Image (tube, grey):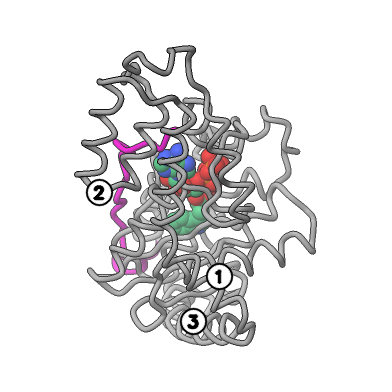
Amino acid sequence: MRILTGLQPSGKLHVGNYFGAMEPAVRLQEQGEAFYFIADYHAMTSSHKADALRENVRELAIDFLACGLDPAKAVFFRQSAVPEVNELAWILSTICPMSLLAKCHSYKDKTSQGIAPNHALFAYPVLMAADILLYDSNKVPVGKDQKQHLEVTRDLAVKLNDTYGEGTAVIPEPIIREETAIVIGLDGRKMSKSYDNTLPLFGDEKTLRKLIMKITTDSTAVEDPKPMENSIILALYRLFASEADYATMVADHERGGIGYGDLKKRLADAYWDYFAPMRERRLAISQDPGYVDKILADGADRARNEAAKVLQRVRRAVGLA
Ligand code: ADP
Ligand code: TRP
């Protein structure tokens, strides 16, 4: 079984990204042949800063490795290291009805946020379909926001087979993370870059602790019991603490007598400890710049090898070879 997913290099990773995307991907690498890539071509649909792109790709690679991606198990590469994906995207766009793309809400959402409506942004789902079909992927784990893109991919795979013969494309199955565990941000809304309410995964300790101290709380007095419904402190603490520590935290909320400052400090300690092993790995990896380059180069070789086979099959089916 081949499992494939892509992550956009779009800046600092936060705790929501970790529990929503990285950690599930790391778990899945045990269950099949994982292909994980950094979607740098996709990042160019909404930003045109060359240095930032280079930097973000590198940082995401280090982050992903620090979070437990195992290059011995997963093929890890950057999307643009396999330029063959563009040829498949072209072939797919020749069978892709305009109406299929016109109904995609991510294009509408992004342009309404002020991102320039360029052609690549509109054609984004076609490139994504090419990412998936180029590796004969069976399972594609994605967040809920990508569900429609997976439907487009399946439509295009079926259409390719209808047009050029069964077996031209493998039809992928999405694994949609329902986000029953949406990670709450520092202001109580969903944690997201766009709300500027994130707790980064990595960074300077003092800054991160300060962020936690800024979590929104009410005006309950120190001695009084603290409300637990909608408590941001509790929701975050649950992610980082053992069951026993979580139970103690709940009991302390019920009893009262401890101020929000102390409860936040406890949260900050748990957060800091939880990511300690990843922080250490991250430090070690970033001190060895050649390591990341080598992993990505090996990954690109393996991915390209696989891509060449599939593309050759498609080229023959469509009459290009
Ligand atoms: P952001 O909302 O900060 O822009 P992205 O949209 O880049 O984050 O998210 C990348 C991945 O991280 C998505 O696939 C999504 O599933 C996951 N993710 C992001 N925020 C959260 C969150 N608050 N809770 C759970 N998962 C999240
Ligand atoms: N569009 C995805 C996102 O923004 C990233 C992505 C690009 C992707 N190509 C993919 C995910 C292929 C899964 C499969 O999160």
Q: Nearer the viewer, residue 170 or 241?
A: 241
Q: Position of residue 106 (x, y in %)?
A: 55, 36
Q: Amino acid at mark 1?
A: Ile
- Mark pair 3, 1: CA separation: 14 Å
Q: Quadrant of residue 94?
A: bottom right
Mark toward the start of the polypeptide (3 vs 2): 2
Compared across the picture, whether 169 is left or right of 195 comes to: left
How would you rate the neighbour count of disc 1 (Cα within 10 Å): few for under 14, some for 14-19, many for 20 or more?
many
| 90 and 274: which is toward the camera | 274
Q: Secondary structure at mark 2?
A: loop
Residue 83 visible in image: yes
The residue where tag 1 is placed is: 62
Numbered label attached to residue 291: none
Residue 262 rendering spot, x and y as whole percentages: 44, 33
For label 3, the residue is 299
Depth check, mark 3 against mark 2: the one in front is 2
Of residues 260 and 140, which is closer to you in this image? 260
Query: Label 3 is placed on what type of residue?
Result: Gly
Q: Nearer the viewer, mark 3 or mark 1?
A: 1
The residue closer to the viewer here, 209 or 310, is 209
Secondary element type, mark 3: helix
Magenta stretch?
A: 164-184
| Amino acid at dot 2 | Ser
Mark seen at residue 242: 2
